[in-house]
Image (cartoon, rainbow, N blue to C red):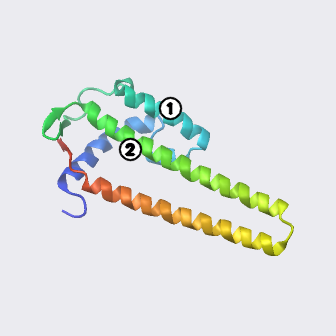
Amino acid sequence: MGILNEKEVIRVDSAKKLEPYFTYIGLSNSQISSYSIEQLESYLKTVEDLIKDPQKLGFPEDLGSINIRVLGVKANLNILIISVLLEKKRLILDRITTLRSQEKIATLRDLVARKVNDSDAQGKLLQELQSLENEAQKLREINNKTEEELAVSKQDTEIEL
C-alpha cells in the first residue's frame, strides 16, 4: 500500500474532512506558514482554548459518518478534532521557533555589520552566523522528517469510515 499503512491513510482522509473548518478560522497549514510571530502567538492561544473545549468549534456531530476507535474502543469526534488541533499547535510552535531564530540571526548580522569595524573579524562573524543558520535549517529538516516518520508509525488510533 505504499509508505502509509491503511489506518494512517484513513486517519488522514478523515482529518482532511475537517480542514475546511480550520481554513475558515485561519488555521490551515498554509495560513499558519504565512503568519507573523504576533499572529502565530494569537492563534496559539486560540488553539490551546480549542483543545480545552473542542466543542467551541461548533462541528456537526456527524461529519460524513466518521466513526472513531481508539485502541478498539469507540470514541467521539472530539478525539479526531483534538488530534488535529495538537498537530496545528505543533505547526504553530515550529513556525514561531523558526521565525524567532531567523529574527535573532538577522539581528546579530545587523549588529556585526554596524559595530564590528575590522573587516576580517566582521567577515568571520558573518560566516559563523551563516553556518549557524545553515545548521539550524538542517536540524529543522531532520525534525520534520522525524515527525513524518513518527506519524507513519502511529497505530494507536484507528478510524473507520
The relative height of residue 128 versus residue 32 in the rendered view (above or below) is below
How packed mark 1 is, by other alpha carbons closer than 10 Å (few <14, some 14-19, many 20 or more), is few
- Residue 113: which quarter of the image? bottom right
Give the percent coordinates (x, y) of residue 122.
78, 69
Q: Is residue 30 left or right of residue 110?
A: left
What kind of residue is marked 2?
A: Glu
The quarter in which the N terminus is drawn is bottom left
Marks 1 and 2, Cα distance to the nearest angstrom?
A: 14 Å
How packed mark 2 is, by other alpha carbons closer than 10 Å (few <14, some 14-19, many 20 or more), is some
Q: Residue at x 72, y 68 (%)?
A: 126
Give the percent coordinates (x, y) of residue 117.
87, 67
What kind of residue is marked 1?
A: Lys
Q: Residue at x 25, y 46 (%)?
A: 11
- Residue 6: which quarter of the image? bottom left
The relative height of residue 78 versus residue 136 in the rendered view (above or below) is above
Residue 28 showing in the rendered view:
no
In the foreground, 113 or 20: 113
Q: Which residue is mark 2?
A: 87
The quarter in which the C terminus is drawn is top left
The relative height of residue 156 versus residue 118 in the rendered view (above or below) is above
Q: Residue furthest bottom?
A: 120
Q: Which residue is mark 1?
A: 45
Residue 138 showing in the rendered view:
yes
Q: Secondary structure at mark 1?
A: helix
Q: Is residue 158 left or right of residue 82?
A: left
The relative height of residue 113 versus residue 151 in the rendered view (above or below) is below
Q: Work out whether mark 1 precedes mark 2 in sequence or the reverse, and give the earlier one.
A: 1
Q: Residue at x 59, y 51 (%)?
A: 99
Where residue 121 is drawn, which disc sits there? none
Q: Secondary structure at mark 2?
A: helix
Give the percent coordinates (x, y) of residue 120.
80, 75
Q: Residue at x 55, y 40 (%)?
A: 40
